[in-house]
Amino acid sequence: MISGYISPNNNAYYGDYDASFYISNGEIMNGKFPSSGAELVKKFILRYKNDLLEMWENETYKKLPFID
C-alpha cells in the first residue's frame, strides 16, 4: 500500500483540473473535475479496478489500455 493514504485512489488531470478518485467506486475523493471527464475516469477505474488495486497494493505500475 502507498504510505500516507487511507483509501486506494487514482489521480486524474485535465487542463487546470485535478482530482483523486476512489478505486473502490470511481467517485471523486477530493479535487475538482468536469462532470463529463469524471464519468470517463469512473468508467476507466471500474473497468480496471482489479489492476489498479493490484498496482496500489504492490506499489507497481503497468500501462493499461485506453477506453472508448
Image (spheres, rainbow, N blue to C red):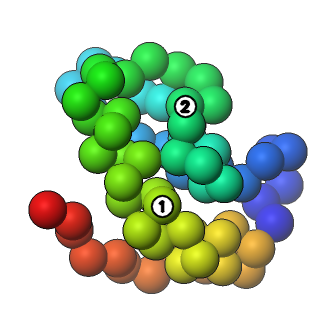
Q: Which residue is mark 1?
A: 46
Residue 59: quarter of image? bottom right
Name the residue: 29% across, 45% down: 40
Residue type (three-letter) at the residue carrying disc 2: Ile
Q: CA distance from mark 2 to mark 1?
A: 13 Å
Q: Residue at x 60, y 24 (%)?
A: 30
Q: Residue 41: percent from the left, percent from the top?
A: 36, 47
Q: Is 37 placed left or right of 33 in the picture? A: left
Instruction: Please tell me in which quadrant of the rendered image residue 20 appears.
Output: top right
* Residue linked to disc 2: 28
Using residue 4 as the reference point, say whether residue 38 is left or right of it: left
Please state which of residues 42 and 58 is positioned toward the viewer in this rendering: 42
Q: Secondary structure at mark 2?
A: strand
Q: Is residue 67 visible?
A: yes
Q: Residue type at mark 1?
A: Leu
Q: Mark 2: few, some, or many residues within 10 Å (few <14, many ≥20)?
A: many
Q: Position of residue 12 (x, y in %)?
A: 40, 42
Q: Quadrant of the N terminus?
A: bottom right
